[in-house]
Amino acid sequence: MQVDQQPGESFEAMLRRFGRTIIKSGILGEAKRKRHYLSKGEASRAKVKASERKKRRKAAREAQRAAANR
């Protein structure tokens, strides 16, 4: 990824623009995901665990809303 300095642009502004470009392109997220290798089984278990956690949080929010409406 390359960002050219625009006329009158400071180095800090160019660096911020570069950072935004990297984030928008998805390169940073991909690098973070690939930082540690996960086998297919580990990835599957992590996905199931995240799904269960999401279900518990949703149930807790709904219970809290129901209690507030009483």
Image: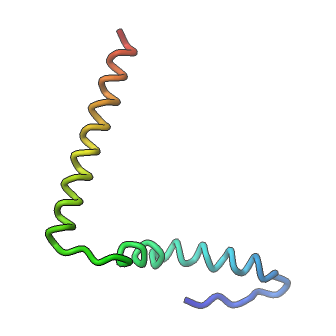
* Nearer the observer, 10 or 52: 52
Quadrant where the C terminus sits is top left
Location of residue 11 with respect to 61 vertically, above or below: below
| Relative side of 3 to 37, left or right | right
The image quadrant of residue 32 is bottom left
Residue drawn at (78%, 83%), measured in percent from left and top? 11
**Outermost left residue:** 41
Q: How is the image coloured?
A: rainbow
| Relative side of 8 to 65, left or right | right
* Nearer the observer, 42 or 58: 42
Residue drawn at (30%, 23%), measured in percent from left and top? 63
Q: Position of residue 48 (x, y in %)?
A: 18, 54
Q: Position of residue 39 (x, y in %)?
A: 19, 75
Q: Position of residue 12 (x, y in %)?
A: 76, 77
Quadrant where the N terminus sits is bottom right
The image quadrant of residue 64 is top left
Residue drawn at (76%, 86%), measured in percent from left and top? 6
| Relative side of 27 to 14, left or right | left
The image quadrant of residue 30 is bottom left
Location of residue 17 with respect to 5 vertically, above or below: above
Q: Position of residue 46 (x, y in %)?
A: 23, 60
**Outermost right residue:** 8
| Relative side of 17 to 23, left or right | right
